[in-house]
Every structure is written in structure tokens, then in C-alpha cells.
């Protein structure tokens, strides 16, 4: 059972990334060129693996080699790199997922005739391709609020009562200082640190300080109170600070796109966040759909920008 699972994974990795190598000039037949670089018949045979040696399969293998060459070129030009520690963690996870120790995985690779260095290389290629692809197509992802709302409503209609999602809401108050031509980062941070110290020393209450100093005038007039909300309702930096600040503790000054803040978590409660959860699921589904479509388009775009020549088999 373990051997079958591991073999399936290896097939996937090597199916995604057919490693091309620089081959010294020989009398071997050239079946195609990519930007002047030849692809030899022996490379196609190697890419076929255990597949039947038919004209259709040879063409599929050849196209896979071409795609991989173009991807490798895009990776090289992007300057993206992969940390070796990330690769090792993935290898360790592969071993764990297959119920193997690291040593047993090495034995399994050896049994398959695959070196550890080759295995690392293929995993690295997989990570690199994903990163370069996502950087390239991520800029063009376009999901509208209307699309998200429509899909989330459809998903909610099909949801069961047991699919209800609960989450923690936080009651938060904050003080905001916005940056201006006469108030830079250092000054804003220093000012908030001083205000925080005065609150902690009992010289002024948080509510009074918010009314006096906060440039979020709507909440400031209410003592900085933002009411109950899920952390995801705020910009990421603010939401993360909410989650890591203990209740009743005033945070250190921190920065968001709006300026510098200090905040205090006043209370928490469990609340129904099913609609929010399904909106998030809908958004992720729409983005993943576009990613899959654009991934195919990305390879086609790489081909359009390359000079590819095929030569008859005979």
C-alpha cells in the first residue's frame, strides 16, 4: 500500500516536471527546436517512460518537454529562488504522509532508481514553477464583489444546518494617528508610545485619550470603540494585532495603511459567521478557477513568445 502511494506521488512529480538536460551534439535525430535549442529523439523516448511508443504519445511527450523548457526559461529570467530548507520540509512531509521514516523514503527512491538529488531537483522545480506562475497570473486575477455574493448565496442555499460556522468576534477600541507632512512615522510612533504610557500610568483614560488624540474621528468620539467584529473585517495588520493582543492589554504602537495605532481588546464573544465563511469560500473558488484557466493560458502565452520548430519523424 505504501509503495503504491509513493509511486503515485513520484509519477505526479515527474509528470509535472520533465527535466531537460544539455546534450552534447551527436548524430542523434533532432525532432524539434525551441528558440534554436534542439530536442533529441532520445529525450522524447526517455520522457515516454512506460507509455506505449505511439505517434500520439511521442507528440505529447515532446510537447511536455517544450513546455518545461519554456517554464525553466521563465523561472531563470524571474530570479525566483527556493530555500533548501523548504524542500527538505516537503520531503519530510512526503515521508510522513506515506507512513515512512526519512530513511525508508530514501530506500524507496533508490528502489525506484531515483536519486535524492534528482528528487530534490524535481520538487524545487515544482515550487519554482508555481511561484513564477502565480506571480505572473496573480496580477491579472479579477474577482468582483458581485461574483462573490452570487456564488456565496448559491453555496448557502445548498448548505445544511450542521454547516453553520461560528467564530470569535472582538470588541476593540483604538487610537489612530495619521501621517501628515508634519507628522512622520517616528513622530507618530513616539507620540502613541507616550499616550500609551500615560494611560498605563493612570494619567488619562483610554476613552479620554481617544477623544483627544485619535484621528479616526468616528470611533474617537466614542472613546475609540469599534464595537464587535471579526478580525477579518479589518486590514490584515490590524486584524493580526487584535488576535495576538490579550484582552485588557493595550498593544504597542503598530502601523497599517491608515497610520499608527494602539488598540485594546475589551471583550470577545462567539458569533455566527456562516455568511462570511461562505463568502470566503466563494472568493477562493472563483480565484482558483481563474488560476487554473490562467495557468493554461500562461503556458500558451509562453509558447506564443517562443520560436518552436517541429521536424518530421522520418
Image (cartoon, rainbow, N blue to C red):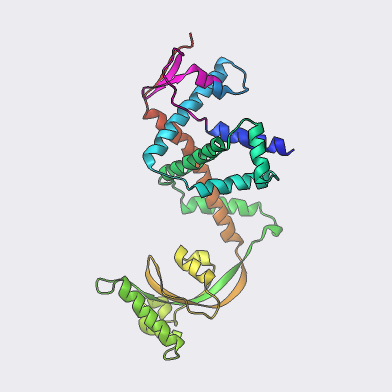
Tell me where residue 45 appears, x and y as whole percent: 55, 19
Is residue 32 in the magenta section? yes
**The residue stretch that appears in magenta:** 18-45
Locate the N terminus and report the quarter of the image it occupies: top right
- Asked which quadrant contains residue 35, the reply is top left
Query: Can residue 235 be seen in this snapshot?
Result: no
The one nearer the camera, 18 or 207, is 18
Tell me where residue 126 appears, x and y as whole percent: 51, 39
Q: Is residue 296 left or right of residue 257?
A: right
Tell me where residue 186 appears, x and y as whole percent: 32, 73
Q: Which residue ends up furthest to the top in the rendered image?
A: 314
Residue at the (48%, 38%) spot, across then down: 295
- Asked which quadrant contains residue 5, the reply is top right
The one nearer the camera, 155 or 82, is 82
Q: Is residue 283 left or right of residue 224?
A: right
The one nearer the camera, 56 or 166, is 56
198 over 274 or under it: above or below:
below
Query: Can residue 198 be seen in this snapshot?
Result: yes
Residue at the (63%, 35%) spot, across then down: 109
Residue at the (52%, 21%) spot, across then down: 44
Residue at the (71%, 59%) spot, across then down: 162
Q: Which residue ends up furthest to the bottom in the rendered image?
A: 203
Is residue 245 in the magenta section? no
Amino acid at each position: 500500500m505504501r509503495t503504491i502511494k509513493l509511486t503515485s506521488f513520484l509519477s505526479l512529480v515527474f509528470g509535472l516536471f520533465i527535466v531537460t538536460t544539455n546534450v552534447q551534439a551527436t548524430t542523434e535525430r533532432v525532432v524539434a527546436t525551441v528558440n534554436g535549442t534542439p530536442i533529441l529523439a532520445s529525450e522524447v523516448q526517455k520522457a515516454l517512460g512506460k507509455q506505449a511508443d505511439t505517434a500520439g504519445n511521442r507528440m505529447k511527450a515532446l510537447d511536455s518537454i517544450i513546455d518545461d523548457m519554456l517554464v525553466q526559461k521563465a523561472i531563470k529570467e524571474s530570479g525566483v529562488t527556493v530555500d533548501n530548507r523548504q524542500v527538505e520540509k516537503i520531503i519530510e512531509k512526503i515521508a510522513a504522509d506515506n507512513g515512512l521514516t526519512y530513511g525508508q523514503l530514501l530506500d524507496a527512491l533508490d528502489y525506484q532508481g531515483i536519486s535524492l538529488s534528482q528528487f530534490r531537483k524535481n520538487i524545487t522545480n515544482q515550487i519554482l514553477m508555481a511561484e513564477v506562475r502565480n506571480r505572473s497570473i496573480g496580477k491579472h486575477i479579477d474577482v468582483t464583489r458581485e461574483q462573490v455574493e452570487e456564488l456565496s448565496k448559491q453555496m448557502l442555499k445548498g448548505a445544511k444546518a450542521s454547516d453553520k460556522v461560528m467564530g470569535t468576534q472582538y470588541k476593540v477600541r483604538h487610537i489612530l494617528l495619521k501621517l501628515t507632512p508634519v507628522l512622520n512615522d517616528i513622530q507618530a510612533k513616539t507620540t502613541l508610545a507616550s499616550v500609551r504610557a500615560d494611560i498605563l500610568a493612570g494619567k488619562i483614560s483610554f476613552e479620554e485619550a481617544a477623544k483627544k488624540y485619535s484621528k479616526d474621528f468616528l470611533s474617537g468620539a466614542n472613546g475609540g470603540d469599534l464595537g464587535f467584529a471579526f478580525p477579518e473585517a479589518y486590514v490584515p495588520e490590524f486584524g493580526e494585532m487584535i488576535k495576538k493582543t490579550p484582552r485588557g492589554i493595550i498593544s504597542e504602537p503598530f502601523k497599517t495603511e491608515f497610520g499608527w495605532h494602539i488598540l485594546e481588546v475589551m471583550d470577545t464573544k462567539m458569533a455566527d459567521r456562516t455568511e462570511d465563511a461562505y463568502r470566503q469560500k466563494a472568493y477562493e473558488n472563483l480565484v482558483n478557477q481563474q488560476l487554473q484557466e490562467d495557468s493554461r493560458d500562461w503556458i500558451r502565452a509562453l509558447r506564443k513568445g517562443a520560436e518552436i520548430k517541429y521536424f518530421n519523424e522520418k
